[in-house]
Amino acid sequence: MVRVIEILEMAPLITIVVMFVTAAAENAPRWLQRLRGRHAQRLEAECHRQEIEAQVRLHLFASVLKANAHQARKELIQASFIASKEAQKQKTDQDY
């Protein structure tokens, strides 16, 4: 008989626990969906950040290549100019 009284005294607590479990079971799909949504948003943000970083690296690499190509063209023009001057000088030396 004492057990029954103890159980009846715990009835409000049991009711609250049952209500909480029921609410959790009903809301679990929404909670999981929100968690998945947040996780997907974090993944998309990380992918976007990495894409931007890759674009920056490519632009920097292209700038370096462009600068190197410009320097190489400049040196080639200078070498060509010097070679043509030497060729003209040798030709004039041979003419005399």
Image: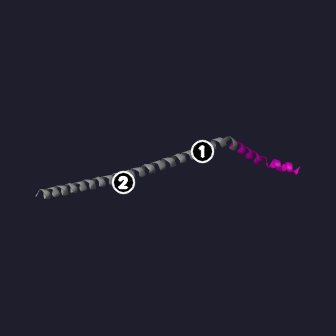
| Disc on res. 68 | none
Distance from Cα at disc 1 to Cα at disc 2:
42 Å
Stretch of the chain drawn in magenta: 1-23
Q: Quick one: SS at disc 1? A: helix
Residue bearing mark 1: 36
Examine the image and state in which quarter residue 37 appears: top right
Residue 33 screen position, x and y as percent: 61, 42
Residue 87 in picture, x, y percent from top left: 19, 56
- Whether 84 is among the magenta residues is no
Residue 57 lies left or right of residue 20; in this view the side is left
Say which residue appears at 81% left-offset and 49% top-offset.
Answer: 9
Which residue type carries mark 1? Arg
Q: Decide: few, some or many residues near mark 1? Use Cα within 10 Å; few <14, some 14-19, many ≥20.
A: few
* SS for callout 2: helix
Looking at the rendered image, the disc whose residue lies closer to the viewer, 1 or 2, is 2
Coordinates of residue 86 in the picture (x, y in percent): 19, 57
Residue type beneath disc 2:
Val
In the displayed structure, 85 sits above or below 31; it is below
Residue at the far left in the pictured view:
96
Residue under numbered circle 2: 64
Q: Is residue 21 magenta?
A: yes
Residue closer to the observer: 52 or 22? 52
Q: How many neighbours does mark 2 have within 10 angstroms: few (below 14), some (14-19), or many (20 or more)?
A: few
Upstream in sequence: badge 1 or badge 2 = 1
Who is closer to the viewer here, 55 or 25?
Answer: 55
